[in-house]
Amino acid sequence: MTYAVLSDHLEALHDGRMVESGARISDSDAQKNPRLIERGVLVEEETERRKPSHKKESEPKAGHDAAAAPQEKEESK
């Protein structure tokens, strides 16, 4: 799991590293910086969100084909 940095300015981590908004840090680094999590500077990211799902991609296509079929029947009348 990773955390995203959401801030208007540079933030200092507990170990002295500086991170900017949009940076990603590991779960272990985030756990060492609980104040940043409490302030909402570090926000959990779900790994599923970054990986496209084949099921999600195929469902709209099937729905689109099914929706197109009735239109073709109406046009042929």
Image (cartoon, helix red, strand yellow):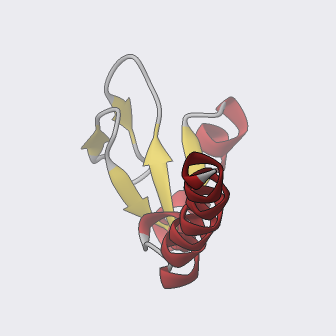
Q: How many marks?
A: 0
Based on the displayed image, in which of its 4 quarters is residue 68 positioned?
A: bottom right
Foreground residue, 15 or 38?
Answer: 38
Based on the displayed image, in which of its 4 quarters is residue 36 positioned?
A: top right
Which residue does the image show at 57% across and 72% down from the upper left?
56
Q: Is residue 6 above or below residue 68?
A: above
Extreme residue toward the front, this view: 77
Q: Is residue 24 visible?
A: yes
Task: From the top left corner, tell me how far across and down residue 44 is, in percent.
Answer: 60, 55
Foreground residue, 28 or 4?
Answer: 4
Task: From the top left corner, tell me how far across and down residue 26 is, in percent.
Answer: 43, 68
Which residue does the image show at 34% across and 19% down from the upper left?
9
Which residue does the image show at 55% across and 44% down from the upper left?
42
Task: From the top left corner, tell me how far across and down residue 32 is, in percent.
Answer: 55, 60
Extreme residue toward the right, this view: 38
Extreme residue toward the bottom, this view: 54
Q: Is residue 46 visible?
A: no
Indicate left or right for 30 with 73 as reference: left
Q: Is residue 7 above or below residue 45?
A: above
Which residue does the image show at 31% across and 46% down from the upper left?
23
Indicate left or right for 5 with 48 as reference: left
Indicate left or right for 1 with 12 as reference: right
Foreground residue, 13 or 24?
Answer: 24
